[in-house]
Image: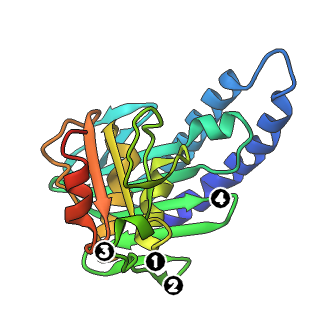
Amino acid sequence: MIKAAEKASKSLIRDFGEVEKLQVSKKGPRDFVTKTDKRVENIIIEELIKTKKNYSFISEEIGKIKNKDEDNVWIIDPIDGTTNFVHGIPHFAICIALQSKKEIVSGLIFDPIKDEMFFAEKNKGTYLNNQRLRVSKKNILDDCLFSSNHQGVKFSNFNMRYTGCAALDLAYVAAGRFDGFFYNDINLWDVAAGSLMVREAGGIVNDLNKFSNNAINVRASNAGINDKMMKELENF
């Protein structure tokens, strides 16, 4: 997973330099970014197949690829934070997760611009560039910082940030940078890796298996504020 992400990131970083130039052109960057998505996705799939040729895939651009082994599934988002990428904002990530028998057992989120590699494996913890991560220990909502992408909804008790990259939001909860994250109707490939990271860093994430792949509601936080956060979000 790390090798695949690192190889794909070279193309992504190069294209990010080009997309910044496209901001001032008449053509615009959207078609260019679509090609980048597909190119990065292809590189990741090619690298993963080299070692696990029978595993299946779920990916944002290609969709589902059923191979001989349907119990083990790679879940891929080649660029999470595409809108940021399109506008030349350096906050996006490559996401890869491995689902085994419908359980996420490993996950990777790589921010190629900041060179931050978040990685988690079931029962083995969450790491950032080989340093063990833990969620924050805050237990008072007013002291906490939350992230979501629901700008139109007011949460009086939450200090909010809207970053445009759900995968990194979850990684930041695992790292203690954010204290909580919530989002409705999000795709599996955006949250598969990050949900494992939060759990393995000592946090709490709701059960994602009861949702369909493209309509997931996520609630993630440290253990100290989870009950309080969930109460505030009862009608959300």
Tell me if mark 2 has few (under 14), some (14-19) or many (20+) residues whose alpha carbon lies within 10 angstroms of its own: few
Q: Amino acid at mark 3?
A: Glu
- Residue on which disc 1 sits: 127
Give the alpha-carbon distance from disc 4 to disc 1, as whole Å: 16 Å
- Circle nearer the N terminus (3, 4): 4
Q: Residue at x 70, y 54 (%)?
A: 10
Element type at marker 4?
Answer: loop
Between circles 3 and 4, the one closer to the viewer is 3
Which is nearer the eye, 88 or 35? 88
Q: Residue furthest top?
A: 26
- Residue on which disc 3 sits: 200
Give the alpha-carbon distance from disc 3 to disc 1, as whole Å: 9 Å
The image's colour scheme reads rainbow
Q: Are marks 2 and 4 in contact (CB under 8 Å)?
A: no
Percent across and percent down for residue 227 are 19, 64
Q: Would you say 24 lies left or right of 89 here? A: right
Q: Amino acid at mark 2?
A: Gln
Q: Are marks 2 and 1 in contact (CB under 8 Å)?
A: yes
Q: Are marks 3 and 4 in contact (CB under 8 Å)?
A: no
Q: Residue at x 42, y 52 (%)?
A: 49
- Residue on which disc 4 sits: 112
- Circle nearer the N terminus (4, 1): 4
Element type at marker 2?
Answer: strand
Q: Would you say 40 lies left or right of 47 here? A: right
Q: Residue at x 25, y 79 (%)?
A: 123
- Residue on which disc 2 sits: 131
Element type at marker 1?
Answer: strand
